[in-house]
Image (spheres, rainbow, N blue to C red):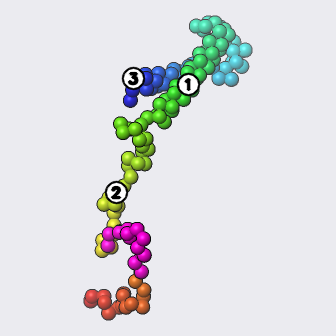
Amino acid sequence: MGLIEGFLLVLHVGVAIGICVLVLLQHGKGADMGAAFGSGSSGSLFGAAGSANFLSRSTAVLATVFFISSLALTYFGATRSTPTGVEKSIMDTQAPKASDVPTLPGTPPATTPAPGAAPAPAASPASGAGKAADVPK
């Protein structure tokens, strides 16, 4: 992670926390009705109507910064490459190996046929496999 990506990530998280705080500070739509009957916010920090404009504009500015930082982080994440210059996805780095695949006890390991070779025929029931006489008592 580069210096710019680290700065953008810290900015992004800070802006997200700021948006949460500003949204929680704002009044809902039903708060205006209570203000009409005497329980208004005339003694608030920003005045009677000033807090709505200040908080909503601040939220809009932080939302714009949040979207821009999201796009920038997406761009840096998409253009990241390995030291060899070949881009890798998470699926390439986490692909299971043939030895990691679990098999049931008694089954032969899975093998892939050589290129151009015909697949081995499956055992048919007529070959005598699976007779009741083969079961130990």
Name the element at disc 3. helix
Please name the amino acid that badge 1 sits on: Ile
Secondary structure mostly seen in magenta is loop
Above or below, 134 against 47 in this view is below
Above or below, 84 against 92 in this view is above
Quadrant where the C terminus is found in the figure: bottom left
Q: Residue at x 51, y 27 (%)?
A: 72
The residue at which mark 3 appears reads as 3
Name the element at disc 2. loop
Q: Position of residue 54 (x, y in %)?
A: 62, 12
Distance from Cα at disc 1 to Cα at disc 3: 17 Å
* Mark closer to the chain start, 1 or 3: 3
The residue at which mark 2 appears reads as 97
Q: Nearer the viewer, residue 109 or 131?
A: 109
Q: Nearer the viewer, residue 87 or 38?
A: 87
Q: Position of residue 97 (x, y in %)?
A: 34, 57
Distance from Cα at disc 2 to Cα at disc 1: 40 Å
Q: Residue at x 39, y 90 (%)?
A: 127
Residue 55, by quadrant, is top right
Q: Which residues are magenta?
A: 108-121
